[in-house]
Image: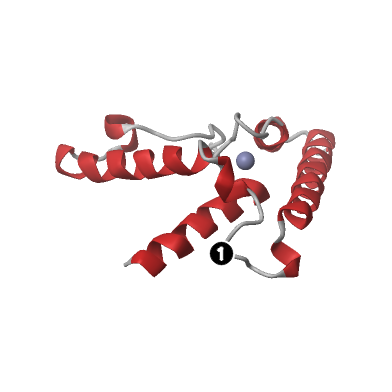
Amino acid sequence: MKRPHKLGVMGGRKAGISRSQKPILQRHLQAHAAVINNEAWYGDGEPSFGKTFTAAETAKRHTLVIGLLYRAAKKATKAKDTELADAYSCLADKLYACRPRFRCGSLACAQCARAFQKAKVVRRQII
Ligand SMILES: [Zn+2]
């Protein structure tokens, strides 16, 4: 079985989404872009999730996850599972490249996932 390792957003037809659903997907893509292009979501402004989820603590977790992924890739390489090793490496590289003004937008990224969570909380407070 081939594992999916291409990370990123799949668009319309590639993802097997009908035309009637596409506007919803586009709205989600716009919301996604709005979060990753606004550094305010990555800071320590409101809403606050407590001391364990400050921007600094999240950055530490981000670094730990990247280290884990590279180690997992190395282990998969030793086990001769190159496809899995590539998937781990690809994700680790993506997370490693995540930085202000060049956010990865992956929910596997501690910093981006926190930003999305903050945006969701604010959106929910508005509704
Ligand atoms: Zn990220």
The 10 Å Cα crowd at callout 1, few under 14, some 14 to 19, many 20 or more, is: some
Residue 108 visible, this angle: no
Residue 31 position in % (x across, y down):
38, 44
Q: Quadrant of residue 73?
A: top right
Furthest-front residue in this view: 45
What residue is pinned by disc 1?
Answer: 47
8 relative to 42, above or below: above
40 relative to 16, above or below: below
Residue 46 position in % (x across, y down):
57, 62
Residue displayed at 62% across by 48% down? 42
What residue type is disc 1 on?
Answer: Pro
Q: Quadrant of residue 94?
A: top right
* Ligand 1 neighbours mark 1 (CB distance < 8 Å): no
Furthest-left residue in this view: 20
Viewer-closest of 71 and 22: 22
Residue displayed at 59% across by 35% down? 103
Q: Is residue 81 left or right of residue 74?
A: left
Residue 21 position in % (x across, y down):
20, 44
User: At numbered mark 1, what does the secondary structure look like: helix, strand or loop?
Assistant: loop
Please state the quadrant of the image where ligand 1 appears: top right
Residue 15 position in % (x across, y down):
34, 37
53 relative to 93, above or below: below
Residue 64 visible, this angle: yes
Viewer-closest of 118 and 112: 118
